[in-house]
Image (cartoon, helix red, strand yellow):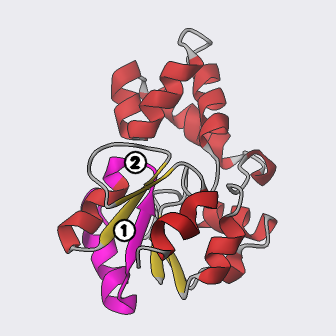
Amino acid sequence: MKILWDFDGTLFDTYPAYTDILYAVMEAKKDKHDISSQLKISFTHAIKHFELSDEQVNFFFDKESQMHPSLTPPFHHLREILSYSELNVIMTHKPRNEVEQILQYYGMEIYFQDMIAGDDGYPRKPDPASYQVLQDRYGIDLVIGDREIDILPAKALGIKSCLFQNQAPCADYYLSSYEEFFDTLILEK
């Protein structure tokens, strides 16, 4: 199976750390659960929802870029899936150097053959342009993401999709943990 992965919230559990940063940016004036929920839609959505200033957004990105990789661990059982799949690629809005730093910290760079990152010049999701490039290169079988904007490009290109820890009614498959991967996806293949 050839899999295109989203990064934040799909491969690595980054939302708790991002929530803490945004909580600090807003000087603890908002509920952490609400912050996390808004971030799960998209960072752009959270900026608009909380009416963040440019200064606050810049502060967030500055703190995020300084975050130690130990604050963003991979999800449990991820290595088994990455080892099983024929090919793994990443499409993320995150800057390439931040992704590479996290992958190297956990020794997981060996599992990925390619990546399109946020600073590679492609339009942001849900635009399918970056997915089309990876599809043309590798013939992707499945896209896994944690938000609707991660799988909408897959739907536009006719690629099977899976939502991780999200039950929005738009995916072909759903996983609440990677322990379920083999039962849910492999047996149906």
Q: Residue furthest top?
A: 29
- Mark on residue 132? none
Measured as percent of width and height from the top left, residue 134 is found at 37, 81
Whether residue 116 can be seen here: no
Is 138 placed left or right of 20 in the picture? left
Q: Amino acid at mark 2?
A: Arg
Q: Nearer the viewer, residue 110 or 62?
A: 110
Measured as percent of width and height from the top left, residue 108 is found at 72, 73
Measured as percent of width and height from the top left, residue 142 is found at 39, 73
Secondary element at image label 2: loop
Which mark lies nearer to you, 2 or 1? 2
Q: Amino acid at mark 1?
A: Gly
Q: CA distance from mark 2 to mark 1?
A: 21 Å
Q: Quadrant of residue 156?
A: bottom left
Q: Residues within 10 Å of mark 2 (few under 14, many from 20)?
A: many
Is 175 placed left or right of 68 in the picture? left
Count of marks placed on residues: 2
Instruction: Name the residue beneath numbered marker 2.
Output: 147
Q: Is residue 34 above or below residue 152?
A: above
Q: Is residue 102 magenta?
A: no
Is 127 placed left or right of 168 in the picture? left
Q: Give the residue displayed 55% in from the left and 21% down from the top.
A: 33
Q: Is residue 140 above or below residue 157?
A: below
Magenta span: 121-149
Whether residue 188 can be seen here: yes
Instruction: Name the residue beneath numbered marker 1.
Output: 121
- Whether the residues at callouts 2 and 1 have beta carbons within 8 Å, the answer is no
Q: Residues within 10 Å of mark 1 (few under 14, many from 20)?
A: few
Measured as percent of width and height from the top left, residue 110 is found at 70, 82
